[in-house]
Amino acid sequence: MAEADDERKIIKAISNNDISSKPDDELIAMLKASWTYEDQDALDVVGRLTTVQGKTGNLLHFLIDLRSVKDGAPLQFPHEGQGLRPRVFVRPADVKRLSPAPDEEPWVRARSALSPLEERDKQGNPFALTAVSGSVNRLTALPREWRIDSLELDGRVHLEESIVSMLRQQYTAELEQEKRVLEAGNRELAVEIQQLNETSAVLRADLEAAGSERAAVTASIASANEALQLAKSRYDSGVTVINSRLSRLRAFVEQRAKELLALDLIDVDNLEALIGPPSTAADAAGHVFDEVFSGDLQTAARYIQAYLHNKGIFYRQAVLLDFLALLRTNDLIVLAGDSGSGKTHLVKSFADAIGGKAVIVPVKPNWNSAEDLLGYYNPIEKRYLSTPFLEALKEAARNPETPYLLCLDEMNLARVEYYFADFLSLLEERGAPLELQLYANTEQAHALSEYKTFISLAREANGGEGGDLDSFVEMLKDERVHQRLRETCGFGSGESLLKHHAHLRRSLGNLVESPSTFTFPTNVRIIGAINVDDTTHYLSPKILDRAHIVRFESPLLQDWDALELEVEQFDLDLTTPLRLIAAQLGERGPYPQLDRSDAFVQFVFALTRDYLNDLGIEVGLRTVRQGANYANELRRLGASEALVRNNFVIHKVLPKLMFDGQKKSRRGHPKSALLQGMRDYLANEIDADALGWRTAYCVDELTRVIETAEANDGIVNYWST
């Protein structure tokens, strides 16, 4: 015992700074030595459960007056930090599970562990403790008359006869009750056995009948295999016929295109756009997703992190997994954060890592209509004036297997609802292919009619339908053909054939490059990058309802050591990207049907009913179905249900928090108090320890919003710092 006292004095002499630098296992060893626990003992403690009000008004629970589970001796922390009290933090969920309802400051027993490092640093206490979830148990005091004094005589433990009689009476009553329950169970079991015997007899009869049917089933399978082989043969023949017809069709199109080229009505670029260059996706370098990763998206995301890390690019695994899940939803993704936080860099890096292409389109402050995004048709020049955004869509359409990530950089320099709302409404269509109406179909029909007429007349002037069309310049050099062309077209002496030809060339070139209706490519994902400051416009409710908002923090605030530990080693060439084809980024299917029995849907309903609606924040069925779709994609990547709920709140709920907290809610409650209630609800529903991924915790984010509002005259704003 004297040696233990000396050891405690030595430990207490160590400075707090020296203690803070020690690893967790040494700190635990110091605690056990101070408490005279053995090395193999758990850090179990006994203490009184007390509740205090935190700085932000929420209730916090602690175990105080800590005692040893061995002998009830008081426990102290093994150092002399000023103002530090030996106590253990208890989560609200563990307090709620205590049954029956705890008395005022009851004694409980719990297993403790060191609090997270950031919490210990915040408290200035390297030994700050937290109760292990599920280990908190209330102690019950025995009646005073049950005080038991035992004696060991003749190798056995002896008690007073009155105590033994009291215990025997209690246990006898309990045994009688258990006996009655057991007898009732035996009766039920007998009934079940009888039912099982009857069922077994039926099954034996069915098995005998099945045996006689087995031969027929085998024959049916053989017949089905023959039919399958026949169908496969017909399919292969059909493919051969279709390929032959496609070859003839391509030859026909090429012949007509060459005629247009000969007449100088289109150029080589127009010809390539009309015929289409062969796809190069199959020849692209990269690890083939299905072959190397067997379709495992979670492993693929970890490889992407390792690939980027090898190039000196650092992103948390949770960020990459979440971004991959969002891409697979086919919804609008908005990356929000300060300049330099890595928003557009994520788009470029991720596209590179999956063998795709990123296109960054800067948004201008003067954009005020859809024409600034997609361009417009000039009726005077008879051509469509395109934009970089539309040109990127056209390029993506020519490479349908390559994923394209189109990023509208500084998306909110202009009001998003002015130039993007119509396009966003189009993106809501989840069934049929999306059709972009660039200009009126009548303009296209008129241009086609002019083209057909000119071709027909040119053929006639050149010797009839069967004659070959030479180059337009050669036709003009031939005086006979030139004159016949003028007569056939009905031109007078003052009209210019060259001018008409130039008009047709511009018109036809516009048809080839920009048809009146353009099908939105399925291999494109739209991403917005925004800064939230005084120089930008905040996103309207329409945009927030339809987009997933991902907030970026400064990369300088990352835990770089923890990030390094996340990066996995792969027996692959890390200089080679992963090759994902567009279809592996998710199909654009309908949102899931609303299932009210689904736990996630019930969570969103309860959050909306009890808090969001009262705060004036509207959540519609579209948001719920969109959230359910995102939840399904996140689960495919191995996310826990706690993480699904956490990320939904961060992406879809918190960005809408912009109001005066001092005002009353719809039901007359102070909005600030309602917001604190929502935080407590989320803390109870979403356990931080169950997230699984190292990511932002929605309760911490909401706490930051509440604290910022308190320092800002009650004005609640998720984007304030």
Image (spheres, rainbow, N blue to C red):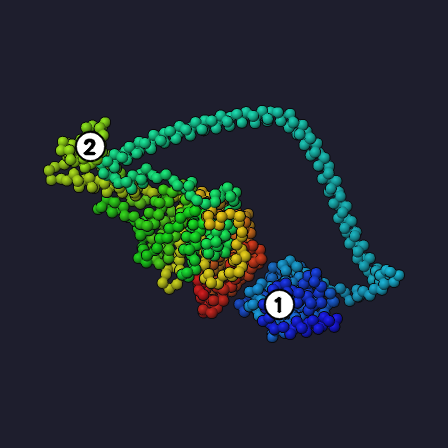
Q: Is residue 466 above or below residue 710?
A: above
Please provide percent x and percent y for residue 2. Answer: 74, 72
Q: Which residue lies under the disc numbered 2? A: 457
The quadrant in which the N terminus is found is bottom right
Instruction: Please give the name of the residue rendered at 79% of the width and 57% of the height, measured from the top-left corner.
Output: 170
User: How far, Cα to Cα, is label 2 from label 1?
Assistant: 94 Å
Please provide percent x and percent y for residue 119. Answer: 56, 65
Tag of residue 127: 1
Q: Name the residue type under label 1.
A: Phe
Total of numbered circles in the picture?
2
Q: Is residue 254 above or below residue 579?
A: above
Camera-nearest residue between 7 and 715: 7
Q: Earlier in the sequence, mark 2 or mark 1?
A: 1
6 vs 548, left or right, is right
Q: Name the residue type under label 2.
A: Leu
Instruction: Please give the name of the residue rendered at 31% of the width and 45% of the height, measured from the top-left corner.
Output: 438
Callout 1: SS: loop
169 vs 676, left or right, is right
Camera-nearest residue between 680 and 317: 317
CB contact under 8 Å: marks 2 and 1: no
Tag of residue 702: none
In which quarter of the view is residue 470 placed? top left
In which quarter of the view is residue 345 placed? bottom left
Q: Residues within 10 Å of mark 2 (few under 14, many from 20)?
A: many
Instruction: Please give the name of the residue rendered at 36% of the width and 42% of the height, measured from the top-left corner.
Output: 398
Q: Residues within 10 Å of mark 1 (few under 14, many from 20)?
A: many
Camera-nearest residue between 406 and 135: 406
Q: Is residue 651 above or below residue 663?
A: above
Instruction: Please give the name of the residue rendered at 46% of the width and 50% of the height, measured from the top-left corner.
Output: 575
Please provide percent x and percent y for residue 24. Answer: 61, 63
Please provide percent x and percent y for residue 667. Answer: 49, 61
Residue at the outermost right position? 154
